[in-house]
Structure formats: C-alpha cells, structure tokens
Image (cartoon, rainbow, N blue to C red):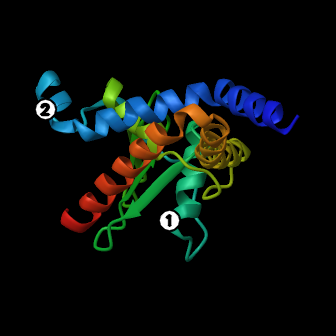
Amino acid sequence: MLSKLIRRTHMYLALFLTPWILMYALSTMAMNHRDFFAQLRGGSDASYAMESAGVYPGTFPPGAKPREMARRILRHLGLDGTHYVQRAPETGHLTIYRESPLVTRRITYTPADRRLVVEKAAFRTPSFLEELHRRRGFEHDYPLEDAWGFIVDIVIAGIVFWVLSGVWMWLQLAGTRRLGLLFAGCGLALFVVFLSTI
C-alpha cells in the first residue's frame, strides 16, 4: 500500500508540475548560454521602444517614498502590478520597471515637469524565460504574486520528494541496487569535485 501511494504521488506530482519544471529547464539553458543567444539576435542589451508620453496630473504627499510614488503612477497608467523602482538622488527622477513575463515596460517620471515616458521592451524568448525563472512571490502586495510563490514552494518540495521517493523506489528493486549505488556514488563524487575546484 505504501509503495503504491509513493509511486502514484511521484507520478501525479510530476504531471501537475510539468509546466514549471519545463520552464525552469529551458530558462536555465537560456541563462547558461546567454552569450550564445545574444549573438543569435545580434546584441545583449534590452531594446526599448517609446510607447507613450504624457504628464502625470496628480501630486504626491510630502516625503512620499519612491515605492508609493511608483504605485500611484502605475495606477494612473492602468499598469498596476509587480514592479521595481529607482530614484536618482540628484534629480529625483523615478525609473519604474513594470515587470511582466510577456511585456516589460520602463516608465520614467521627471518631477520638474511631471513628464511620464513609457517605453516597452522588445519581446525576446530568452529574456521571457529568464523573467519567469527569476519571478518569485511574497515580495509584492499582489495576490497573484503570492500564488506564484506558493507554486514555486510546491516545486521545491516536489523536487525534494522526487529525490527521496526515487531513492526509496530504488531500494525496493533489489536487482538495481548495485548499479544504482554506482550512479549515486559517481554523481556525488562529481558534485564534490566541482564544489572543491570551481
């Protein structure tokens, strides 16, 4: 009974997490061979194109922090969502990166004239995969980000479970123990060599 439960959990968990495991596999390949993919597209710098320009009509309370200002600006533009913001200490300019796997935008706010410039990054598959890979939850005030973070936790737990259940299933098959021990030993030895030399 226990053997059947472990095997079924091993299988169904793998089926449920297949999109995430494929995403992490492909995105890791994109990051591991970043220079190669950059050469294929003729450059590595992110390419932004002007999407819109205008003036922010609102005002900010005295002492407003960059994060609060960015949130107000994004709501005004109808782009509220996961973002990062930087403020230039000399000029007070805000640069907001509104991150999304499919479309990343850079919004620049100039306080002197309240000018807003919205630029859209060109879609590139390696960048899309890397954005998904680095995406994590629990850092922003958005429920969907937390849901994504929860799924990532399930992926982490799933990988640990696959390792443990794989070892358990290997030990149940007497005919594979010697060869399995050889593979496990070689993998561990190679890992230790890398840890001690790189």
Residue type, numbered disc 2:
Gly
Q: Quadrant of the N terminus?
A: top right
Q: In this rendering, would 165 be left or right of 115?
A: right
Placement of 16 over or under 78, stated as above or below: above
Q: Quadrant of the C terminus?
A: bottom left
Q: Which residue lies under the disc numbered 2?
A: 43
Residue type, numbered disc 1:
Pro
Q: Secondary structure at mark 1?
A: helix
Please name whichever residue, 144 or 40, is drawn nearer the observer in this view of the structure: 40
Q: In this rendering, would 111 be left or right of 169?
A: left
Q: Which residue lies under the disc numbered 1?
A: 66
| Disc 1/disc 2 C-alpha distance (Å) | 32 Å
Classify 10 Å Cα crowding around label 2: few (below 14), some (14-19), many (20 and above). Answer: few
Percent from the top left, x then y, of residue 55? 45, 44
Please name whichever residue, 37 or 77, is drawn nearer the observer in this view of the structure: 37
The disc label shown at residue 136, or none: none
The residue positioned 44% from the left and 58% from the top of the image is 85
Of badges 1 and 2, the one in the foreground is 2
On the question of residue 98 being in view, the answer is: no
Percent from the top left, x then y, of residue 132? 48, 37
Q: Residue furthest right?
A: 1
Specify the quadrant of the image occupied by residue 140.
Answer: bottom right
The residue positioned 56% from the left and 71% from the top of the image is 64
The residue positioned 67% from the left and 42% from the top of the image is 151
Please name whichever residue, 11 or 27, is drawn nearer the observer in this view of the structure: 11
